[in-house]
């Protein structure tokens, strides 16, 4: 078993967290742009070749899933849109476009880089489990009620 991929993945997460702390005050667009750029850098360093297929499928499913979850949270009263002025259609269009950007970044990071690099060292089943756990961990903060 090789451990170079595991080490790269740990460095990847450390770098993403470190850079996110400094970029986050600039807003979510810049934060995800940094995640995408770091992902591309690590894909190049690890010499991961893109697999045939269409990455838009995963990104589209991610965008639709997040949009549906948000819509459900709004309808169930678990979330509210406050402090927004303007046309509701424009706001929804911006939200969907931003979620598409986020979905692309997450696909690139977790499936394009983390899953592929881990797969070389630990095999597909363990790589799926580890990358899924990392994905869930990254999202725990947004699911926990703060305050």
Image (cartoon, rainbow, N blue to C red):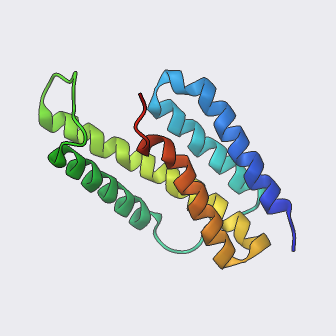
Image position of 8 with respect to 37: above or below: below
Q: Nearer the viewer, residue 147 or 57?
A: 147
Q: How many marks?
A: 0
Residue 34 at what x, y percent from top left?
59, 37
Residue 117: quadrant of the picture: bottom right
Q: Residue at x 33, y 53 (%)?
A: 66
Residue 36 at what x, y percent from top left?
57, 45
Image position of 91 with respect to 10: above or below: above
Q: Nearer the viewer, residue 19 or 125?
A: 125
- Looking at the rendering, in which quadrant would you find the N terminus? bottom right
Q: Is residue 20 left or right of residue 77?
A: right
Q: Residue at x 18, y 34 (%)?
A: 90
Q: Nearer the viewer, residue 129 or 52?
A: 129
Q: Is residue 35 left or right of residue 146?
A: right
Q: Nearer the viewer, residue 36 or 82?
A: 82
Residue 32 at what x, y percent from top left?
51, 39
Could one spot residue 49 in this view of the protein?
A: no
Residue 105 at what x, y percent from top left?
51, 49
Could one spot residue 40 in this view of the protein?
A: yes
Q: Residue at x 68, y 46 (%)?
A: 13
Q: Residue at x 36, y 41 (%)?
A: 98
Image position of 1 with respect to 18: above or below: below
Image position of 86 with respect to 69: above or below: above
- Looking at the rendering, in which quadrant would you find the C terminus? top left
């Amino acid at each position: 078993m090789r451990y170079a991929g595991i080490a790269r993945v740990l460095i990847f997460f450390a770098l993403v967290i470190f850079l996110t702390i400094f970029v986050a005050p600039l807003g979510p667009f810049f934060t995800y742009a940094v995640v995408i750029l770091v992902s591309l850098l690590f894909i190049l360093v690890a010499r991961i070749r893109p697999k045939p297929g269409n990455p838009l499928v995963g990104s589209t499913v991610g965008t639709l899933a997040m949009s549906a979850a948000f819509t459900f949270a709004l309808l169930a009263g678990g979330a509210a849109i406050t402090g927004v002025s303007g046309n509701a259609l424009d706001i929804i269009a911006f939200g969907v476009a931003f979620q598409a950007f986020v979905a692309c970044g997450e696909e690139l990071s977790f499936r394009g880089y983390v899953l592929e690099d881990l797969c070389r060292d630990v095999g597909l089943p363990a790589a799926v489990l580890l990358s899924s756990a990392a994905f869930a961990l990254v999202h725990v903060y947004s699911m926990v009620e703060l305050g």
